[in-house]
Image (cartoon, helix red, strand yellow):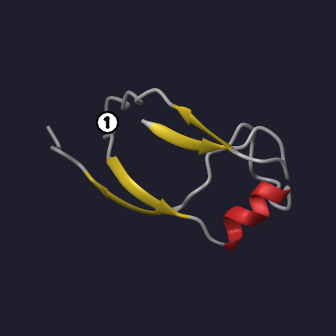
Amino acid sequence: MKAVVFENFGEAPTIRTALHPKPATDGVVINVEATGLCRSDWRGWMGHDGGIRLPHAPGQDWRAWWPSLD
């Protein structure tokens, strides 16, 4: 899968290939098809949000589906 990632605050993000995550024993993995960026993502990119750890893949408004809950 592809992800937009920024390594440093305020610098240009890059698109990189990311590994598919493994779910916890009591978790699920969902397939995110699209994500949007908003003002809070911009604030994180600029370093105005102290809760963001680098590297960071922004995007919190997404469209997703899960193939099964088995």
Observer-nearest of 25 and 57: 57
* Residue occupied by mark 1: 26
Which residue occupies 72% across, 43% down? 6
The three-letter amino acid code for the residue at tag 1 is: Asp
Observer-nearest of 42 and 69: 42
Name above or below for residue 27 compared with residue 65.
above
Which residue occupies 71% across, 46% down? 13
Name above or below for residue 36 compared with residue 55.
below
Is 65 left or right of 2, judged from the image as shown?
left
Residue lying at the far bottom of the rendered structure: 39
Name above or below for residue 25 compared with residue 47.
above
- The x and y percentages for residue 5 are 65, 42
Q: Quadrant of the N terminus?
A: top left
**Numbered marks: total:** 1
SS at badge 1: loop
Is 27 left or right of 61, judged from the image as shown?
left
Is 57 left or right of 24, judged from the image as shown?
right
Q: Quadrant of the C terminus?
A: top left
Name above or below for residue 61 compared with residue 69.
below
- The x and y percentages for residue 49 are 80, 59
Residue 48's quadrant in the figure?
bottom right
Residue 46's quadrant in the figure?
bottom right
Residue 26's quadrant in the figure?
top left
Which residue occupies 38% across, 27% down? 22
